[in-house]
Image (spheres, rainbow, N blue to C red):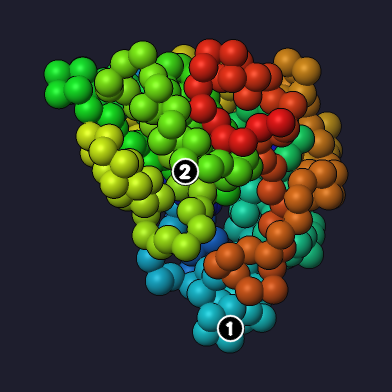
Amino acid sequence: MKRIGIMTTGGDCSGLNTVIQRIYRAASLRGWQVIGILDGTDGLSSAPPQFIKFDKDTLPIENARLAGSFLHNGRANALNFETAIERGKVEQFNNKLRKSLSELKLDALILIGGNGSISLAWCNKEIYAGLQLICIPKTIDMDIPLTDKTIGFNTAVQQLTTFCDQLMLTARSHHRWFVVQTMGRDCGQLALNAGIAIGANAILIPEIKFDINSLISHIKGADSDYGIILVSEGISLRGHSGRPADMISRKLTAAGIVNRPAFPEHTQRVGDTTAADRILATRMADCAVNAIENNETYVMTAIKDCKCTTVGLNEFFNAGEITNDPRIPGVKTSDAYVSPDDPLLQIAVDMGIYIGETK
């Protein structure tokens, strides 16, 4: 009988509970024992390691639609990869992880995380020697290389779309523009997809340079005196500081355009998991369990050409743009961004949406 562990790390999102529940379901049908590691690597660095044993009542299927993680994703200021470097305790932290994994006597570990967590897993792969490591990509940012979909993204787009739909009603009532700041870090996929969904008048993302005067001219020339301007949190405006939506709002106000900034913030990370994300979570859970059965290790589940498959963590890491992790000095992260040939960019242009200074 195999003994497998499940761990969620990094930021939370909708779909985590679905994939956890589906992993347990598929594993239990094979007669495997499943444990859930609490608080990600925080739980592993505790003595003894913090975990729960799964049975059919641990995470009922009716609760699997809920946002957040039943296993939690970590505590503020706990010892983790980031704080270990800050405190000069990297080797101590790594040794704790090795010791805990040895004590848990796992045959396999399924790590559900974003590009930072999966990059860390690959860069510290020796910690997981002796067991099968399978990663499942989840993030609302859609910044993970080699997969066309990530768990949580579809629900986040729906949450942002719903938020903007409601704002559009008050925008119309007051002949007002709303500058809505989205999450996404340095990747503009969330803003781009939600912007297409709501019919935004402008979408500003980090991957495309924009000219503030061109944006102002576009809004003034619109056939309406209200609407939504979506601004990804990763954009910058030369010579200005502060939150991107505030910066853009001040420029529009100075140009005589009535507007308000708006911040959906963490509502983008929650919401009942959409059907599309539930299906994706189920596909990736099935793929991960099959990978364990096939004796694969150091792999990530991925959607490629509509098929759910596994790719090597080395392939994942080398396929993206490798950058310094902003929170962990000396550690590299593999990032994906909106591609210049993403079809949604041309669709936005065709729909009269300002997306920046495209060629």
Task: Write the residue at 52% across / 84% down.
Answer: 87
From the viewer's perspective, is residue 265 above or below residue 149? below
What label does residue 89 carry, if any?
1
* Residue farthest along the bottom direction in this orientation: 88
From the viewer's perspective, is residue 139 above or below residue 318? above
Task: Write the residue at 47% across / 43% down.
Answer: 212
Determine the image quadrant of residue 33.
Answer: top right
Position of the N terminus, as image quadrant, is top right
Mark closer to the chain start, 2 or 1: 1
Query: Camera-side residue: 341 or 271?
Result: 341
Mark 2 = which residue? 212
Position of the C terminus, as image quadrant, is top right
Q: Is residue 321 visible?
A: yes
Q: Is residue 107 visible?
A: no
Crowdedness near tag 1: few (<14), some (14–19) or many (≥20) residues, C-alpha within 10 Å: some
Determine the image quadrant of residue 329.
Answer: bottom right
In what element is the residue under mark 1? loop
In what element is the residue under mark 2? helix
Q: Position of residue 217 (x, y in %)?
A: 43, 31
Query: Camera-side residue: 235 or 301?
Result: 235
Query: Camera-side residue: 76 or 319?
Result: 319
Q: Amino acid at mark 1?
A: Lys
| Horizontal side, residue 309 vs residue 50: left or right | right
What label does residue 239 carry, if any?
none
| Horizontal side, residue 171 vs residue 230: left or right | left
Disc 2 versus disc 1: nearer the observer: 2
Separation of marks 2 and 1 at Cα, in angstroms: 46 Å
Q: Position of residue 126 (x, y in %)?
A: 78, 64
Q: Amino acid at mark 2?
A: Ile
